[in-house]
Image (cartoon, rainbow, N blue to C red):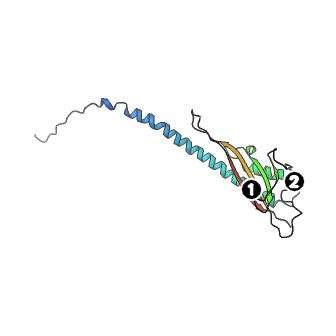
Amino acid sequence: MTGRSVRTPARPRSNERGASAVEFALLVPLLVMLVFGVIDFGIVLAQKQSLSSAARAGARYGSVNLFDPDSHNCGKVIDQTRAEAQTIAMAGTSVTVEVLRGSSLAAATRVCSTDASLTPNDSSVAPCANASLAAGTIENLYVRATRRDTTIGIPATPIAATFDLSSTGAFQCEYH
């Protein structure tokens, strides 16, 4: 040999011809499920955050505007909550709003609601107006925003979940 390397001819790989296509076909559904799962999670997380913010905004609106007779009623609190709840994937009108008042959420009584099956349901009631309280008694206004949601699922499959998203905001009623 004079320094030249001798190359051996490469063997044809006839037994591995379609392996990469099969591997691709096996991995694509998993990757699609992962991508749509991340998208679903992001949409649900944004809706939950929007409901939390809307419930707090509604409770604040109801407790701060106590002495303005034109804007202080359950209907305005509900409208404020629904207006704050809108996102790209969620319309405010799809949100059920319940307004409660009490010393704690467990002891709170319902003042009004957008659910017609719940009573009382008078939207003209002032949510923080309670003249029967003794001096020094503290009451909170609770606003619960709820939405029935469905995940977008994975295209061409029946995988989708329906669940309730709910959040409650609380502010102290300011009686003078």
Which residue is at a point 84% across and 56% down the rendered structure image? 127
Most foreground residue, 4 or 88: 88
Closer to viewer: mark 1 or mark 2: 2
Query: Which quarter of the rendering shows the N terminus?
Result: top left
Residue 135 drawn above or below residue 120: below
Disc 2 residue crowd, few under 14, some 14–19, many 20+, Cα 10 Å: some
| Residue that appears at 75% across and 49% down | 83
Residue 139 placement (x, y as % from top left) = 80, 63
Pointer 1 local density, CA inside 10 Å: few below 14, some 14–19, many at least 20:
many
Residue at left offset 20%, top offset 35%: 8
Q: Name the residue under label 2.
A: 125
Q: Position of residue 165 (x, y in %)?
A: 68, 48
Position of 44 with respect to 101 (left or right) is left
Q: Quadrant of the C terminus?
A: bottom right
Q: For mark 1, give the secondary structure.
A: helix
Which is nearer the N-term, disc 1 or disc 2?
1
Query: Which of the 4 image quadrants contains residue 169?
Result: bottom right
132 horizontally vs 50: left or right: right
Which disc, if any, is residue 57? 1
Instruction: Indicate the position of residue 135 as horizontal and vertical percent values.
Output: 86, 70
Residue toward you, 106 or 157: 106
User: Alpha-carbon distance for marks 1 and 2?
Assistant: 18 Å
Which residue type carries mark 2? Val
Please say if 137 is above or below 58: below
Look at label 1 and name its amino acid: Ala
What is the secondary structure assignment of the residue under circle 2? Answer: loop
Relative depth, front residue between 104 and 38 = 104
